[in-house]
Amino acid sequence: MNTFFLFISQNFIAVTLLLLSIIALIIYEGRKGGKKLSPSEATRKINKEEALVVDLRPSQEFSSGHIAGSINVQVDKLEQHLTTKRHSKETPVILVCKTGVASKKLGVSLIKAGYLDVNVVSGGMMTWEGNGMPLSK
């Protein structure tokens, strides 16, 4: 244990830079794909800012229960759908999938396509339902 502290004291600048780099990487990766919203934050954004809610789950899962007012679009057709329907790139977009993983990946491509306010429901529909939020059928 003494050698560990000796190493840190002799290489303080290098260790500090390493820790700062790791923290920066965690923050950068965490922000990828858009802002993470809790179900209550997503509800507020839907009600106050008239956000477009896009459900990326398969149509069978969507029909079993979804966020009121959401549209069901397959992952590979989202950008085409948004362009066809002429949704403004300034309109807030909330992506939701089953667990939040697919939403995060697709959020990255929407940001690259120029959408300014991309959001992801953290934990997806599993968290939405777990928090007792309402579903529409």
Image (cartoon, rainbow, N blue to C red):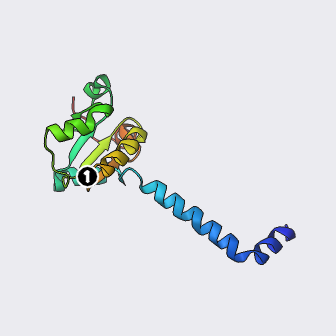
Relative to 81, residue 15 above or below: below
Relative to 12, residue 113 above or below: above
Residue 129 image position (x, y, % from top left): 35, 38
Residue nearer the viewer, 13 or 48? 13
**Label 1's element?**
loop
Q: Residue at x 39, y 45 (%)?
A: 104
Residue nearer the viewer, 88 or 50? 88
Q: Quadrant of the C terminus?
A: top left
Image-quadrant location for residue 135: top left
Q: Quadrant of the N terminus?
A: bottom right
List the single residue furthest toward the left. 86
Residue 136: tell me if it is visible: yes
Q: Which residue is mark 1?
A: 115
Q: Residue at x 25, y 39 (%)?
A: 79
Q: Residue at x 26, y 37 (%)?
A: 78
Relative to 88, residue 7 above or below: below
Q: Is residue 14 left or right of residue 60?
A: right
Residue 22 image position (x, y, % from top left): 59, 62
List the single residue furthest toward the right. 2
Residue 8 image position (x, y, % from top left): 76, 72
Q: Is residue 108 left or right of residue 49?
A: right
Q: Residues within 10 Å of mark 1 (few under 14, many from 20)?
A: some
Q: Amino acid at mark 1?
A: Tyr
Residue 66: tell me if it is visible: no
Q: Is residue 11 left or right of residue 70?
A: right
Residue nearer the viewer, 26 or 81? 81
Q: Is residue 5 left or right of residue 19?
A: right
Image-quadrant location for residue 133: top left
